[in-house]
Image: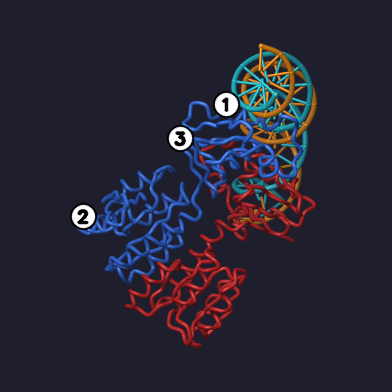
Chain colours: A red, B blue, C cyan, D orange
Amino acid sequence: MKLLLIEDDALLAETLADVLRLEGHRVTTLQDGREARQQLSHADHGQDLILLDLNLPHCSGLEVLAALRQCDAKTPALILTARGAIEDRVKGLDLGADDYLAKPFALDELEARVRALLRRQARDASLQIGTLNFDSLAQRFTLGGEYLNLPPREQRLLACLMRHTGEPVDKVRLASEAFAGESLGDNAIEVYVHRLRRRLANSDVTLHTVRGLGYQLVSS
Amino acid sequence: MKLLLIEDDALLAETLADVLRLEGHRVTTLQDGREARQQLSHADHGQDLILLDLNLPHCSGLEVLAALRQCDAKTPALILTARGAIEDRVKGLDLGADDYLAKPFALDELEARVRALLRRQARDASLQIGTLNFDSLAQRFTLGGEYLNLPPREQRLLACLMRHTGEPVDKVRLASEAFAGESLGDNAIEVYVHRLRRRLANSDVTLHTVRGLGYQLVSS
DNA sequence: ACGTTACCTTACAATTCTGTAAGGAAGAAC
DNA sequence: GTTCTTCCTTACAGAATTGTAAGGTAACGT
């Protein structure tokens, strides 16, 4: 995931960026408010999450946020603010921030909040892995540009796996997430997996089994 | 908006509930953890936002949260927790909470956070008409609380109609939006409509035909 | 190596979905 | 009214999906 960190304290910025990189994200940092505003004032800035300090040189964080929300209501923004500045936080949330963190904060907490925001964002984005795409608006899969018509059970299975791209999903979880409220035969999921694999053959997407942990989609 | 406040301190609960009611929300309160878990462990609890104290009698707030997320990944949950219990907050966020507030907190801040969560929720609102609901996360329909399993063609037809709730959708549009890239028989859509109607019979949702303009969902 | 467990594959019958066609009903236009 | 058009309903055969069972394979622990 691509994160943009806007923070004028260079030391803090580097520390945070490192922590987030360890979590597997690509992090860009900016020190200057005006620059940030410029970069965020067109819709395709390409970021998945903005971390924004409110106290910036040249242009306050609130202004940056306002500029961001003017052209992009979707990308989540997490505000970093000095403890006690409640007013600012309230203003920030009402301006369209999704969350804030009061300095000083525990790094664990930062990570947890970033995870929470990215998880939520992942819910609405159209899911993609390799040439396999799930358009959440049209409710349809495409594979290599072609529509992929799946029976309901396989569709739910695949959608669930795509929602958890990168991590293996075990059968119990699949049963409760993808087939909630439906009766499932003994080895039903294994059979669905098998049938899905047949459809995904000759594509760049493979349904790996992670023994003991579940199934996982990977693009080769 | 309907809020559920789960907080064992009766005095605090009433204060908060009053504040939120002043903002125009309908607030229900619960004191007991076990009761809360029970009420939230089926998907159609009907709440728009859960405010959850972690320190509850009989059943911890984290358990309540886990039970909620088991059957409903959608409804935002805001955790209320004692200041300093960072561990709990991190756990809560990773369990699927959307936000937390450390006690004691300013009422302004509570209001701002509730607004932020409800605003966000409105963005990815699930489609609803009468008791018919389309959960865009789970990719599933429910009708009167029951899952409604539809064949792919009927599912696309219904999803398309729900996306245009209120306006009639004509056959050409249905063909291109719901069945893009698929060959359609002469009167195929009429047949699908007929089959869908059979399934929606005995519900509060009707599929009206607006002669010359298309089909339209209405809740009676 | 052995047994155990988890997972794979296959096959088949039962069910459900799909396309097509044909005839009927209802509204609009004349 | 009549005619035309649009939409409804029904039925049926072909196709696809689903549940189930049975036997196979591969990884794992001891």
Res. B198 mark: 1
Helix, strand or loop at disc 1?
A: helix
Q: Earlier in the sequence, mark 2 or mark 1?
A: 2
Report whether B212 appears left or right of A7. right
Dot 3 and dot 1 within a common chain: yes
> Which residue is rendered at x = 32% and y = 72% of the image?
B84
Chain letter of mark 2 equals B
Q: For mark 3, what is the residue?
A: B144
Q: Distance between the residues labelled 2 and 1?
A: 49 Å
Counting from the top left corner in percent of width and height, residue A58 is at 48, 87
Q: How far apart are marks 3 and 1 (CA)?
A: 16 Å
Report whether D28 appears left or right of A90. right
> Which residue is rendered at x = 26% and y = 51% of the image?
B31
The image quarter containing residue A194 is top right
Residue type at tag 3: Gly
Residue type at tag 2: Ala
Helix, strand or loop at disc 2?
A: helix
Residue type at tag 1: Arg
Report whether B152 appears left or right of B133. right
Q: Which of marks 3 and 1 is nearer the N terminus?
A: 3
Q: For mark 2, what is the residue?
A: B10
Dot 1 crowding, Cα within 10 Å, few <14, some 14–19, many 20+: few
